[in-house]
Image (spheres, rainbow, N blue to C red):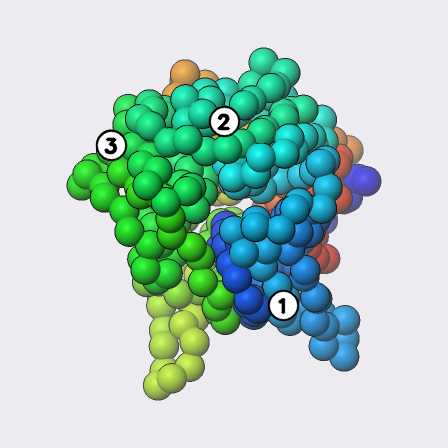
Amino acid sequence: MNTIITPHKFTGTVKIPASKSHTIRQLLIASLADGESEIKEPLDSLDTRSCIDACRAFGAKINEVYDDNRKLISLKIFGNNNFKMPVVSNGIDVGNSGTTLYLALAVAALQSQPIEFTGDESIQKRSAAPLLDALAGLGVQVQSNNGCAPITIKGTWKGGKVSLPCPTSQYLSALLIAAPLAPAGTLTEIDVPLLNEKPYIDMTLSYLKSHGIAYEASPDYSYFKIPGGASWKSFSSFVPADFSSAAFPAAAAAITGGPVTLLGLDPNDTQGDKYFFEILKEMGCDVKWQKENNSEHTVIVSRNGALRGGTFDLNKTPDLLPAAAAVAAFAQGDTSFINVAHARIKETDRIAVMSKELLKLGVSCTELPDGLIIHGKGIISAPEKTVIEGHGDHRIVMAFAVAALGANFPIEITTAECADVTYPGFLDLLA
């Protein structure tokens, strides 16, 4: 599906959808627990649907609860008790959800029967080789297409010590969620010579702590030791709003001036992508956090002066690159995004794709092996009938949708439907 975005000023109040990262973690944890859990106000997106399908395949029973307007308000999960009951299906299709794939691969290693994973065309190009090597080192049987799906996993988890370089933090989160459920007496030790996206490990560890699961970790997270024999507990919890998704309406405010009021974000959450608001402030935006009495936090983003360039380290927050690059296209001078080579191994090579597509809008860029420099001129000059390729990547589509708001002509964007992977209704919101 293609969409056409017409330039206009974007203002108003936006309720930010729930966090994909929290929703998927809670779904898997609830599915592993014994008893009934409730996830309140989860993200209802294509990635969530992929994870629900995977959890049902693992034997969890999941009831979806809707309000009168058919809005998903909660998920009630009856867990499979650390998979003490047989898994329902031998085949799991994760769609476009890399988070579901990586976390579920480790979860599958708790089972003694083989489980095959597949996904869409993008997933079949994304290697999980470091994670698969680590699982093999823990005694798990692994078959794959050179590290990519289709992947077959067969337990059981025997433990031991492995090295796990993490260009994506999801590899480590996968082992942290599954390792405590290995048989009692099993010890899993993990050396981590490379770790990107550290805040997502803080998020995963927050769940281990809240469930009373024991682990040892070095201060820099370069080493973990996790004893087996533990279990996840049933729970009832709300899902925090998603800072990764909030970056796009915030970027729209930065590009067009706003003001835009964002609802539901908690500045104390572990999500690293809250760094986006620091980027906007350094680039010349006004960012105001507010909280009155017991009400939820709000953040208001606006801009009166010109946007200015800067240098920003995105190692902890690679998902911010597309939205930040869209804003940088409207800045005066160079904006450098550095230390973010792992942006190349997302749904697309986001460094190369942003550079290629921004050039169509008259914005020149310099690719670095681990980053991107945007040579901004304060405006973008798109030729009439410009078509931007979305490349089937939800963050690329949304980044150029907000960039189009500040263009001189309407801009057409391909594969627009994939915005629903994490932010259903976003394109309607812009309109």
Pinpoint residue 142: horizontal percent, then vertical percent: 56, 22
Pinpoint residue 122: horizontal percent, then vertical percent: 66, 28
Pinpoint residue 53: horizontal percent, then vertical percent: 70, 49
Placement of the N terminus among the 4 image quadrants: top right
Residue type highlighted by circle 1 = Lys
Question: Mark 1 Cα within 10 Å, few/some/many (few <14, many 20+)?
Answer: some
Q: Which residue is mark 3?
A: 222
Among numbered discs 3 and 1, the one appearing first in the sequence: 1
Q: Which residue is mark 1?
A: 76
Among numbered discs 1 and 2, the one appearing first in the sequence: 1
Q: Which residue is mark 2?
A: 140
- Relative horizontal placement of residue 312, taking residue 363 as reference (left or right): left
Question: Mark 2 Cα within 10 Å, few/some/many (few <14, many 20+)?
Answer: many
- Relative horizontal placement of residue 304, taking residue 93 as reference (left or right): left
Residue type highlighted by circle 3 = Ser
Q: Tell me the CA gap for discs 3 and 1.
A: 36 Å
